[in-house]
Each structure stands twice: as C-alpha cells, then as structure tokens.
Image (tube, rainbow, N blue to C red):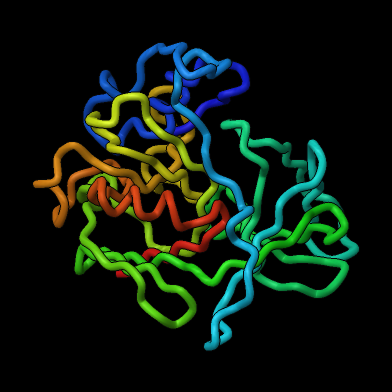
C-alpha cells in the first residue's frame, strides 16, 4: 500500500505500499543513514524512463510513456473539455509522475491514470509532458501463476508468480509501473525490489493508512510462488524482480489476465 512519502518517513511509506501483499511488514524497512541518503531510510525510489527511449522492435509493438514536465498536470475528461482533476509530480515516492499513453492525437494524449477505479483514463496536453517509448510489456496469467516479459513480440523473460488470495484477489486489467523501490532488508518479505502498479485492490479501499495500491515485488518465501498467497500484489522470485528492476522502465505496461 502507499502513503505520502513527502510527508512521512520512507520506512512507513514502503510499509503502506506493500502492507497486505505479505502478512508481516515488520522486516520491510528500518532506519538507516549510510550511503549518503538524505531520507530516514534507504528505501530508495530508483526507477525512471531514461532507459525507455529506443527504436521500436521489428514487429512494431511499443508503448509511449508520458513524463510530466512541471510540478502538476491537468487532466481533462475530453479533448478541449472540462478539467476533471489536477495530479501532482513527483509522486509520493519522489519519482517523476508518468502515464501510459493509450492514444496519441498530436496536441492531446489519452492516458491511463493511476487512480480508482482501475482502468480510468483521461486526456492531457502533449505540451505538458515529455514522451518516451518502450518495447517492453509484462503479461501476468493469474490462472497459470506465470508471467512473461515481452520485447516487442518476442518473449525475453518468463517465470512464476504468487497472486492474491480468494478474499483479496489480484484484479485483472491493464496497468503500468509507477515507481521502483529497493527495500532496506534484501532478505525481507518484499525481496530485493518492489514496483508500484497504477492499480488498486478491489477489496481493500484502505489498509494500514494507505490506499490499497497494488505492486509487483520479490519475496523471502519462494515456496509460496505458484499459489494464491497475497492480499492482491504479485510476488515473483528475487531473481526475476532483480532482472525486471534492471531492464524495465517506469511506465512499462502490465497486463493481468485470467
């Protein structure tokens, strides 16, 4: 789950992001000042879109990522329509706010929004963002407990996942990566890394002070992979989440099926 990192300690924010994904948050983070980090802990936001921009694959399968230029952006219900909300940047983790572009119509972009209900879309002005492109996407099959990372139309990484329990399921849908966090305790419940997702639990409107945000993260209980074990988040092996952290940009699309 997530809370406002700009107003609270990073340790608490990471716990709020991921509380409910694992049963215990006590080992998630701890205060640490080593390494020159100015915040309370080294639960560091790490992702950006700098590695996203490159030529599209031969198959032409790619997605556009819009990064907000200023400190806030206006979202409209329709092109030239009334404004519906203002979203600030950076996000709660100090990461530049990004959106996954669904339609590019020149001066206007329809984007997927990181808000409830899942799948919400809005229009933003192209002049308010910087565009990048990624050929990567992540597909998660809930029924098969598996994931595949594609580079264009080519599978480049596959693995197993754990998903939400029956009472707190991982909701199907189209999402995107919103931030990358490295927990202090690499052997803790959330493993080596955690990616925030743009979606939210359909059951947990709030949990431990956070809004019920979903995530993809590592685990210190690999035996649970291949089962329904979480409160909605997707767990993968530490090897897999480390590969994702090194190769996937913030904004990369994630599709949950099944």
The answer to which quarter of the image holds residue 89 is: top right
Q: Residue at x 64, y 64 (%)?
A: 53
Q: Is residue 184 above or below residue 75?
A: above
Q: Nearer the viewer, residue 183 or 101?
A: 183
On-image quarter of the N terminus: top left
Residue at 27% of width from left, 48% of height from top?
A: 235
Q: Give the position of the C terminus as an image quadrant.
A: bottom left
Where is residue 257 shown, x and y percent of the image?
Answer: 35, 69
Residue 184 location (% of width, % of height)? 36, 24
Image location of residue 9, percent across then percent down: 51, 15
Q: Nearer the viewer, residue 60 or 121?
A: 60
Instruction: Please report the residue visible at 63 percent of the width from the left and 53 percent of the height from the top.
Output: 50
Vertical arrangement, residue 143 with respect to residue 187, above or below:
below
Name the side, left or right, on which 44 lies relative to 18: right
Percent from the top left, x then y, of residue 151? 46, 74
Q: Residue at 67% of width from left, 41% of height from top?
A: 96
């Amino acid at each position: 789950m997530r809370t406002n990192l700009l107003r609270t300690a990073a340790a608490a924010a990471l716990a709020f992001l991921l509380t409910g994904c694992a049963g215990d948050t006590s080992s998630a983070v701890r205060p640490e000042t080593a390494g020159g980090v100015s915040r309370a802990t080294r639960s560091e936001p790490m992702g950006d879109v700098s590695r996203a921009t490159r030529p599209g694959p031969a198959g032409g399968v790619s997605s556009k990522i819009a990064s907000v230029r200023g400190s806030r952006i206006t979202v409209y219900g329709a092109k030239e329509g009334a404004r519906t909300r203002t979203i600030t940047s950076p996000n709660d983790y100090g990461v530049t706010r990004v959106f996954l572009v669904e339609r590019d119509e020149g001066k206007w972009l329809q984007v997927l929004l990181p808000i409830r209900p899942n799948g919400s879309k809005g229009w933003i002005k192209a002049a308010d963002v910087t565009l990048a492109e990624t050929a990567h996407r992540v597909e998660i099959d809930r029924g098969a407990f598996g994931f595949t990372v594609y580079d264009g139309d080519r599978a480049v990484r596959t693995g197993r996942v754990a998903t939400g329990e029956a009472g707190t399921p991982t909701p199907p849908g189209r999402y995107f990566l919103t931030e990358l966090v490295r927990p202090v305790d690499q052997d803790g419940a959330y493993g080596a890394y955690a990616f925030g997702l743009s979606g939210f639990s359909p059951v947990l409107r709030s949990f431990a002070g956070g809004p019920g945000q979903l995530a993809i993260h590592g685990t210190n209980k690999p035996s649970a992979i291949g089962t329904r074990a979480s409160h909605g988040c997707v767990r993968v092996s530490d090897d897999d989440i480390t590969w994702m952290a090194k190769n996937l940009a913030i904004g990369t699309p994630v599709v949950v099926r099944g």
